Image (cartoon, rainbow, N blue to C red):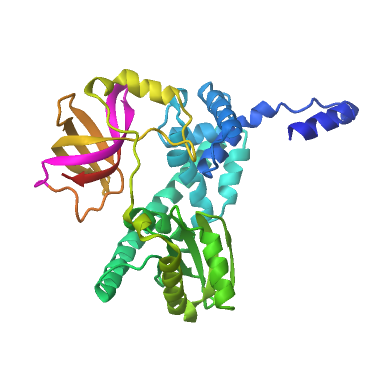
């Protein structure tokens, strides 16, 4: 776009029409939102653009649609982090395309009236809440299917292909991500389209290129897959409903053949433990200021052993805890999102191993240190 603007300016295109050359900095809020929400790798250039976009949003120089999304998500623009774009704004925008009509999200980003933007943001927020409810039901059904597979074969196959006739096409991608995170293996979730075919969305782990795997299946078994596309970590495909069980078997066999079994163990790589003195607001703020963090530029992940002093569920699937480092240190609040509620909370557990990010919780003007827990295990 920069090159096009320069070309048109040099040709006198803007002067001939009596219009100013566009200020592309005004698009940086969209660049930041799209880069983070679509999980684009944060290479050097993308990190700079995302940082500039975040800076404009923090300064209030963003379009009304983004302001309205921040309001409905209860996020303070001045303290916005890249993770807020990915976990608070992105899901609300995507909910429209998943469940209804993506034009609602497009209209929100294009509108120039804050009143209209708030109406559209409320509509997207309601759609996102519906999406969460659908996802929770689908996830429970998927876990039941996994249990059935384990009982029939003593262990889960290396690659999971799952289908339920009541699943929603717009939510199978999120479902595949959740099951992949839970069982540490490639997953493809399918939903019916209503015409005798299934629409699938796949998510992979390091070590298996999802699109290459589908291409290999298409070569080995012509006609099994009607169409497919994607990249290393995610792909979409369709197939005839009558051939799902055949695909399920072939996909499981291929993943078992291609993937090193050690990669199915879900190894967690951390940046090591923090000393008690490093568990502070100053360090948490330093890490926040060092962002933006994101795809291919992950936020530091620490690990350690903690005494588990309090635990309770909040919001149905999130575990709120209070912990204390076993070697001494401050009392810390922590939260783990989307835990297995058949395991947690467990009042018999007194000590845990955590993999966590150091964060600052801001609520009603108060700031406190907290741990964002990615993984927890009874010790």
- Asked whether residue 184 appears in the rendered view, the answer is no
Is 367 in the magenta?
A: yes
Please tell me whether residue 244 is drawn above or below residue 362 in the rendered image: below
**Is most of the magenta stretch helix, strand or loop?**
strand
Task: Give the left or right position of residue 253, taking residue 319 as reference.
Answer: right
Q: Residue at x 24, y 39 (%)?
A: 354
Find the residue positioned furthest to the bottom.
242
Spot occupied by residue 221 in the image (x, y as percentages of width and height): 55, 78
- Which image quarter: residue 283? top left
- Which image quarter: residue 7? top right
Q: Which residues are magenta?
A: 347-372
For the C terminus, which image quadrant? top left
Please tell me whether residue 23 is drawn above or below residue 131 in the rendered image: above
Spot occupied by residue 211 in the image (x, y as percentages of width and height): 55, 61
Find the residue positioned furthest to the left.
348
As rendered, which of 300 and 227 lies closer to the eye?
300
Task: Give the left or right position of residue 133, taking residue 326 as reference.
Answer: right
As rendered, which of 51 and 269 lies closer to the eye?
269
Spot occupied by residue 365 in the image (x, y as percentages of width and height): 32, 21
Is 265 in the magenta?
A: no
Spot occupied by residue 223 in the image (x, y as percentages of width and height): 58, 78
As rendered, which of 147 and 56 lies closer to the eye?
147
- Asked whether residue 120 appears in the rendered view, the answer is yes
């Amino acid at each position: 776009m920069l090159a096009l603007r320069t070309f048109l300016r040099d040709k006198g295109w803007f002067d001939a029409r009596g219009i100013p050359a566009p200020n592309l900095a005004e698009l940086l809020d969209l660049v930041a939102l799209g880069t983070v929400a679509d999980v684009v790798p944060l290479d050097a250039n993308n990190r700079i653009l995302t940082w500039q976009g975040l800076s404009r949003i923090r300064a209030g120089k963003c379009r009304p649609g983004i302001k309205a999304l921040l309001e409905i998500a209860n996020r303070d623009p001045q303290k916005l982090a890249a993770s807020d774009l990915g976990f608070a704004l992105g899901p609300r925008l995507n909910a429209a395309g998943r469940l209804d009509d993506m034009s609602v999200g497009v209209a929100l980003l294009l509108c120039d009236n804050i009143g209209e933007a708030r109406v559209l943001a409320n509509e997207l927020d309601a759609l996102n809440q519906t999406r969460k409810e659908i996802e929770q039901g689908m996830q429970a059904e998927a876990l039941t299917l996994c249990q059935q597979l384990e009982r029939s074969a003593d262990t889960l196959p290396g690659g999971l292909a799952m289908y339920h006739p009541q699943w929603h096409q717009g939510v199978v991608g999120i479902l595949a991500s959740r099951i992949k995170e839970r069982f540490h293996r490639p997953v493809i979730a399918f939903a019916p389209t209503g015409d005798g075919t299934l629409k699938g969305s796949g998510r992979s782990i390091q070590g298996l290129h999802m699109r290459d795997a589908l291409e290999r299946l298409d070569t080995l078994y012509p006609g099994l897959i009607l169409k497919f596309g994607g990249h290393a970590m995610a792909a979409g495909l369709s197939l005839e409903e009558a051939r799902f069980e055949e695909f399920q078997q072939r996909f499981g066999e291929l993943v078992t053949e291609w993937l090193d079994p050690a990669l199915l163990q879900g190894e967690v790589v951390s940046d090591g433990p923090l000393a008690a003195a490093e568990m502070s607001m100053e360090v948490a703020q330093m890490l926040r200021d060092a962002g933006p963090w994101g795809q291919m530029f992950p936020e530091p992940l620490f690990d350690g052993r903690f005494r588990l002093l309090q635990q309770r569920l909040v919001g149905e699937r999130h575990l709120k805890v209070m912990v204390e480092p076993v070697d001494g240190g401050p009392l810390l609040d922590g939260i783990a999102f989307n835990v297995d509620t058949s395991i947690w909370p467990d009042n018999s557990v007194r000590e845990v191993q955590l993999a966590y990010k150091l964060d600052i919780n801001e609520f009603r003007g108060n700031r406190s240190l907290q741990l964002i827990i990615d993984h927890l295990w009874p010790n």
